[in-house]
Image (tube, rainbow, N blue to C red):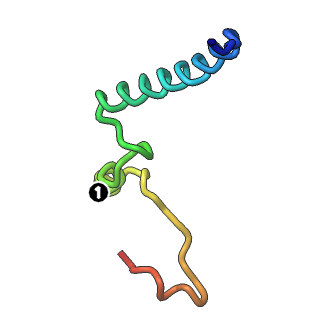
Amino acid sequence: MALEVNILGLIATALFIIIPTAFLLTLYVKSSSEKNVSGGFSQSYFDESKSQGKKKTNLSAKFKGKGEGMYSDS
């Protein structure tokens, strides 16, 4: 005695899992083969541009107040 299965529900569930998984795997393989790093540019990119006199540095605001001692100066 077999149970009845809603074939449209089965197909919808399979597509719901397969399509996003295939899309994410494609993105991963592409970025992995191009040796891309998460976050865009590495720190060396900013260090080299700063030493060459270009303005591609990561400028940030100066820390003030109670939490100033929590962070290193480098």
Q: Residue 13 appears in which quarter of the rendering? A: top right
Residue shown at the point (32%, 32%) measured from the top left: 32
Q: Is residue 70 above or below residue 40?
A: below
Near-viewer residue (55 or 63): 63
Question: Which residue does the numbered mark 1 point to in the structure image?
Answer: 51
Residue shown at the point (70%, 10%) measured from the top left: 8
Q: Residue furthest top?
A: 7
Element at label 1: helix
Q: Is residue 66 above or below residue 10?
A: below
The amino acid at mark 1 is Ser
In the rendered view, does 67 fall on the left or right side of 30?
right
Q: Residues within 10 Å of mark 1 (few under 14, many from 20)?
A: few
In the rendered view, does 9 fall on the left or right side of 47?
right
Q: Quadrant of the N terminus?
A: top right
Near-viewer residue (74 or 24): 24
Residue shown at the point (40%, 30%) measured from the top left: 28
Q: Quadrant of the C terminus?
A: bottom left
Q: Residue 73 appears in which quarter of the rendering? A: bottom left
Near-viewer residue (66 or 50): 66
The percent position of residue 15, horizontal first and vertical second, equals: 59, 16
Residue shown at the point (50%, 22%) measured from the top left: 23
Count of labels in the image? 1
